[in-house]
Amino acid sequence: MTIAHTGIKTPADKHAAIVEWYTAALAPLGYIKAVDFLDGLVVGFLDTATQNVDWWVTSAAANPPTNPGQAQAPDSEDVAPLPTHTAFAAKDRATVDAFHQAAVAAGGKDNGPPGVRAHSGPNYYAAYVLDPAGNNIEAVYNPPA
């Protein structure tokens, strides 16, 4: 089963900077900032290969209900979201390299330079960067053996 979309929640005071970071870091993977809601507090990124908006960056200040018709959750703006790990599929090794370079240039912290990760498979080529909120973001190219 394929995941239709996913994303992260950001601290309100870092949201704009984190959206800027993802705009730069995901460009080599074919993503563009495509939609926003609630005055930019919820931002969707489009995978230009699939034409799906499948990556969302939401400010804690948006605080939307999780289900339509549900009462709004208590204000959590002052609670820092826990860091997550997300891996984006890349079309080749050069794209993994370009992601890593763009993500670090945009202010991300190197968390593992591009290379083969033999523990994950003989062809598992990946790079890891921490986004400005501390999330571990990976780009991976993993062709069949």
Image (tube, rainbow, N blue to C red):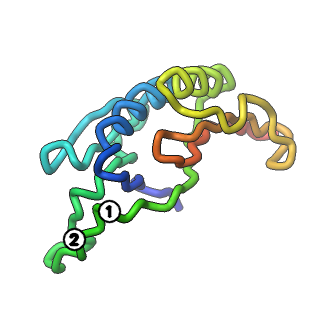
Of tags 2 and 1, the one toward the viewer is: 1
- Looking at the picture, how far across and down is residue 74, in whole percent? 24, 76
What amino acid type is highlighted by mark number 2?
Pro
Residue at the spot x=65%, y=38% of the render?
128
Disc 2 or 1, which lies upstream in sequence? 2
Q: Is residue 2 above or below residue 55?
A: below
> Measuring 29% from the left and 58% from the top, which residue is drawn there?
60
| Contact between labelled residues 1 and 2, with CB atoms less than 8 Å apart | no
The residue under label 2 is 65
Residue occupying the far front of the picture? 78
Residue 1 location in percent, x, y? 53, 62
User: Position of 43 compared to 135: left or right?
Assistant: left
Give the labeled residue for mark 1.
Answer: 78
Picture residue at 50% right of the left edge, 28% below the top? 107
Estimate the spatial distance between the alpha carbons at disc 2 and disc 1, rounded to whole Å: 17 Å
Name the foreground residue: 108 vs 25. Answer: 108
- Between 96 and 14, the residue placed more toward the observer is 14
Q: Residue at x 74, y 34 (%)?
A: 125
The image quadrant of residue 68 is bottom left
Task: Label 1: state its secondary structure.
Answer: loop
